[in-house]
Image (spheres, rainbow, N blue to C red):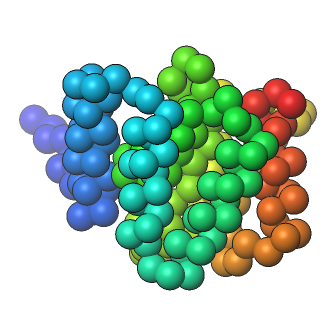
């Protein structure tokens, strides 16, 4: 008899799953509002180490300015922005989340970034300068169909 391999999750993955369960309970209890979503998102960003926090605040500003219809929220404990259907379009996570050496800016499948048969959906950032802000703004506007 063949046994299935044991699936184990890292401590970081387990923490992300617990965060998501907590987010879903909170949303079901109080509903989703822009103010609550932004408060939760900024709490996550403020808890990041200083260098990542600075990048996160800049990314939040760029996304908020360029896609004001997206709802700020947290998603698996990460800052995220959802469309009117509640689907996450764009998110970012600090390097610390999964012990990576860079902040990740990612886009989910509802983002309108399609170009041909292959396109990037995640970007590594070690710094957010005005040049990156312009590129992020372009990507976010495209992701929401602008």
User: Residue at the location (63% across, 33% down)?
Assistant: 70
Point out the image quarter for the C terminus.
top right
51 over 19 or under it: above or below: below
Residue 16 image point, x, y percent: 32, 52
Foreground residue among 43 and 9: 43
Q: Residue furthest top?
A: 85
Q: Residue furthest left?
A: 1
Point out the image quarter for the N terminus.
top left
Residue 46 image point, x, y percent: 44, 67
Q: Quadrant of residue 43?
A: bottom left
User: Residue at the location (39% across, 48% down)?
Assistant: 40
Residue 101 image point, x, y percent: 55, 79
User: Residue at the location (42% across, 48% down)?
Assistant: 39
Q: Is residue 116 left or right of residue 92?
A: right
Residue 84 appears in the rendering: yes
61 over 25 or under it: above or below: below
User: Residue at the location (82% across, 39% down)?
Assistant: 141
Residue 50 image point, x, y percent: 50, 81
Q: Is residue 112 left or right of residue 10?
A: right
76 over 47 or under it: above or below: above
């Amino acid at each position: 008899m063949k046994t299935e391999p044991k699936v184990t999750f890292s401590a970081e993955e387990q923490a992300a799953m617990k965060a998501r369960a907590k987010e879903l309970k909170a949303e079901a209890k109080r509903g989703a509002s822009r103010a609550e979503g932004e408060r939760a998102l900024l709490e996550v960003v403020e808890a990041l180490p200083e260098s990542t926090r600075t990048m996160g605040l800049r990314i939040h500003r760029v996304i908020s300015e360029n896609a004001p219809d997206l709802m700020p929220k947290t998603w698996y404990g990460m800052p995220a922005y959802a469309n009117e259907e509640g689907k996450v379009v764009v998110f970012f996570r600090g390097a610390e989340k999964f012990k990576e050496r860079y902040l990740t800016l990612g886009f989910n499948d509802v983002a309108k970034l399609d170009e041909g048969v292959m396109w990037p959906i995640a970007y590594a950032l070690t710094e957010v300068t005005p040049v990156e802000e312009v590129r992020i703004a372009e990507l976010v506007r495209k992701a929401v169909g602008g």
